[in-house]
C-alpha cells in the first residue's frame, strides 16, 4: 500500500503547485488590469486566455461591479486557498492513513 500512499502524496504536491501557480497568474492578471495594457502583447494575451474561462462565469454571477472594481479574482483566489487547505491536506492525510 506504500505505492498508493506515495502516489497520493505526490498528487497532492502537484495539485498544490498548480494551484499556487494559477493563483499567481490570477494576481498578475489583476495587477495588469489596473493599467491600460496592450491587448496584442503576448503576455497580456496569455494571461487573458488562461484566466478568462475561470473569471468570466464568476463575473457573470456576481451581482454588480462595486464601484468599478472587479472582485472575481478575489473569489478565485479564495477558492484556490480553500482547495489548498481542504483538498491537498485531505489527500496527504489519506495517504498517511493508508501508509
Image (cartoon, helix red, strand yellow):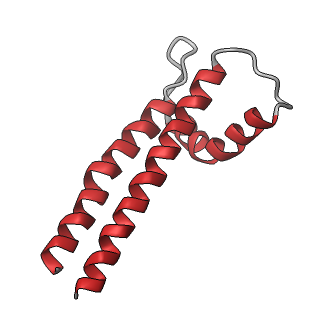
Q: In screen coordinates, is 62 left or right of 9?
A: right
Residue 95 drawn at (x, y percent): 22, 73
Q: Which quarter of the figure has residue 40? A: top right
Q: Position of residue 27 (x, y in %)?
A: 53, 30
Q: Residue furthest top?
A: 67
Place residue 96 in its image quadrant. Answer: bottom left
The answer to whether residue 98 is above or below residue 25 is below
Residue farthest to the right?
40
Say whether residue 37 is left or right of residue 15.
Answer: right
* Residue drawn at the location 27% of the way across and 66% of the way down: 91
Question: Which of 29 and 7 lies nearest the eye of the viewer?
Answer: 7
Would residue 27 appear left or right of 88 to someone viewing this image?
A: right
Q: Which sits in the foreground, 78 or 4?
A: 4
Kindly identify the residue that appears in the image at 22 percent across and 88 percent down: 1
Residue at the left extreme of this rendering:
97
- In depth, the one of 53 and 15 nearer the eye is 15
Q: Residue at x 53, y 24 (%)?
A: 64
The residue located at (62%, 42%) in the rendering is: 51
Amino acid at each position: 500500500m506504500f505505492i498508493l500512499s506515495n502516489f497520493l502524496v505526490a498528487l497532492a504536491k502537484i495539485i498544490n503547485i498548480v494551484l499556487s501557480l494559477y493563483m499567481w497568474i490570477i494576481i498578475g492578471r489583476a495587477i495588469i488590469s489596473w493599467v491600460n495594457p496592450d491587448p496584442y502583447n503576448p503576455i497580456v494575451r496569455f494571461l487573458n486566455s488562461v484566466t478568462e474561462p475561470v473569471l468570466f462565469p464568476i463575473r457573470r454571477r456576481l451581482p454588480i461591479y462595486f464601484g468599478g472594481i472587479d472582485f472575481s479574482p478575489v473569489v478565485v483566489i479564495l477558492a484556490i486557498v480553500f482547495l489548498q487547505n481542504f483538498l491537498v491536506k485531505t489527500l496527504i492525510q489519506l495517504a498517511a492513513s493508508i501508509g
